[in-house]
Image: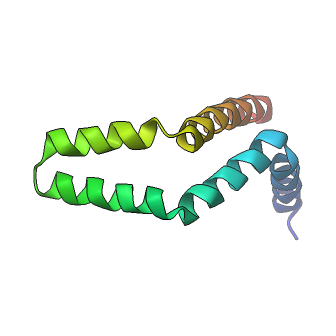
């Protein structure tokens, strides 16, 4: 294996061991498998297609106020910050 590719694989492995990466993946999996969230997302898409912007916004607000979504977004932002730091170090 190319040395650069090997190093990249090692970095990826270390990133996936980070607590924020583990939590991100855990929450992502829960969200992807949650029937209520899936239903809300489908309704939002349908309402937007039908140009029912007010109704879509109301459901979007409901979705975004769910604790799992709030936690997911916070963890996602933490992980993004960590990845920026790693990226800057590698430059």
Position above or below: 66 against 78: below
- Quadrant location of the N terminus in the rendered image: bottom right
Looking at the picture, tell me which residue is in the foreground, 11 or 77: 77
| Residue displayed at 41% across by 44% down | 63
Q: Where does the image place residue 26, in percent across and percent down from the top left?
A: 72, 54
Position above or below: 61 against 31: above
Position above or below: 69 against 33: above
| Residue displayed at 43% across by 62% down | 38
- Specify the quadrant of the image occupied by residue 32: bottom right
Residue 30 left/right relative to 40: right
| Residue displayed at 45% across by 59% down | 36
Residue 26 left/right relative to 63: right
Q: Where does the image place residue 78, in percent across and percent down from the top left?
A: 68, 31
- Quadrant location of the C terminus in the rendered image: top right
- Specify the quadrant of the image occupied by residue 85: top right
Q: Where does the image place residue 41, in percent across and percent down from the top left?
A: 37, 56
Which residue reaches farthest left?
51
Position above or below: 54 against 15: above
| Residue displayed at 25% across by 39% down | 57
């Amino acid at each position: 294996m190319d040395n650069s590719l090997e190093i990249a694989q090692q970095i990826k492995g270390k990133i996936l061991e980070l607590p924020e990466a583990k939590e991100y993946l855990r929450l992502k999996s829960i969200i992807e498998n949650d029937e209520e969230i899936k239903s809300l997302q489908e309704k939002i898409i349908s309402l937007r297609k039908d140009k029912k912007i007010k109704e879509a916004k109301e459901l979007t607000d409901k979705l975004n106020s769910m604790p799992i979504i709030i936690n997911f977004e916070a963890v996602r932002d933490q992980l993004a910050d960590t990845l920026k730091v790693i990226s800057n170090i590698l430059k």
